[in-house]
C-alpha cells in the first residue's frame, strides 16, 4: 500500500494593500485584555508610514469614550514582520509606563488598549493600539494645519518671521497661503 501526502493550500487571494485598510471603517475590534470592551472604527483621521489612525468609540457596558486606534499597515507587517510587532510592543510598553505616572506626564496621550486584527481571507494579523483622543481644537490636528493657522492669524509683518522659523515647509506654506496651487 503506497502512502500519498495530501496538502491543502489556502485559496489564492490578492495581497492586502495598505489602502484596503480604508475599508475597515465600521469594523468592531474586541479587546482581548478587557472582556466586554469594543472599539468601533468610525473614520480615518490620519495615515503615516506605519499605518492608519481611526477615530473609534470605546464601548464598555453602558459607557462610551472616544479614543484613537492605530492599525499597522500590511506593508509594515509584511516588510518587517518581527520588527513591526516589536516596535508596537515597545510603543505599548512606553505608553503604559508613562500612563501610570502620578501625576500624569503632560503632552503624552494615555495608553488605553492593544490587540491584533486578524484578517483571515488575507492570512495576516495587524497589530493595533488604542490611545486617548485629543481634539486639536481650532488650530487643527496636524503640524501643517497648525502652521497655516498661525500664519493666518499673524499680522503681515510677523508672517516672514514665522515662515523663516520653519524652512523645510516655508515655500509650500507661502504658496498655499498666497492661494497658489502647490
Image (cartoon, rainbow, N blue to C red):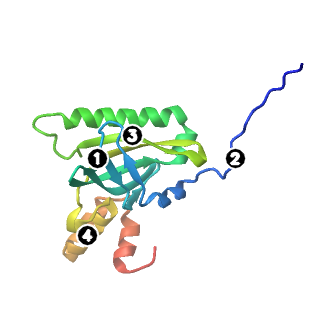
Question: Quick check: 142 left or right of 88?
Answer: left
Q: Looking at the picture, tell me which residue is in the foreground, 68 or 119.
A: 119
Pointers 4 and 3 in contact (CB under 8 A)? no
Pointers 3 and 2 in contact (CB under 8 A)? no
State which mark lies toward you, 3 or 2.
2
Q: How many marks?
A: 4
Question: Quick check: 79 left or right of 61?
Answer: right
Q: Locate the N terminus and report the quarter of the image it occupies.
A: top right
**Who comes first in sequence, dot 3 or dot 2?**
2
Residue 82 position in % (x across, y down): 51, 31
Residue with the mark numbered 2: 11
Residue with the mark numbered 1: 131
Residue 150 in which image quadrant: bottom left
Question: Quick check: 126 left or right of 39?
Answer: right
Secondary-structure class at tag 1: strand
Q: Residue at x 63, y 50 (%)?
A: 15
Name of the residue lying farthest toward the front: 1
State which mark lies toward you, 4 or 1.
1
State which mark lies toward you, 4 or 3.
3
Name of the residue lying farthest toward the bottom: 179
State which mark lies toward you, 1 or 2.
2
State which mark lies toward you, 4 or 2.
2
Question: Quick check: 117 left or right of 158?
Answer: right
Amino acid at each position: 500500500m503506497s502512502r500519498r501526502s495530501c496538502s491543502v493550500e489556502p485559496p489564492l487571494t490578492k495581497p492586502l494593500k495598505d489602502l484596503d485598510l480604508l475599508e475597515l471603517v465600521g469594523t468592531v475590534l474586541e479587546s482581548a485584555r478587557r472582556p466586554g470592551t469594543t472599539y468601533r472604527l468610525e473614520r480615518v483621521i490620519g495615515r503615516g508610514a506605519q499605518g492608519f489612525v481611526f477615530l473609534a468609540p470605546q464601548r464598555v457596558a453602558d459607557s462610551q469614550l472616544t479614543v484613537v486606534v492605530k492599525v499597522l499597515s500590511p506593508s509594515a507587517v509584511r516588510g518587517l514582520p518581527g520588527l513591526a510587532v516589536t516596535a508596537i510592543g515597545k510603543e505599548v510598553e512606553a505608553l503604559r509606563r508613562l500612563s501610570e505616572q502620578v501625576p500624569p506626564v503632560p503632552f503624552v496621550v494615555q495608553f488605553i488598549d492593544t490587540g491584533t486584527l486578524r484578517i483571515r481571507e488575507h492570512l495576516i494579523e495587524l497589530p493595533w493600539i488604542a490611545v486617548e483622543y485629543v481634539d486639536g481644537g481650532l488650530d487643527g490636528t496636524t503640524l501643517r494645519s497648525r502652521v497655516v493657522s498661525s500664519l493666518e492669524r499673524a499680522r503681515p509683518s510677523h508672517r516672514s518671521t514665522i515662515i523663516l522659523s520653519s524652512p523645510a515647509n516655508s515655500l509650500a506654506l507661502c504658496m498655499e497661503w498666497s492661494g497658489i496651487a502647490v
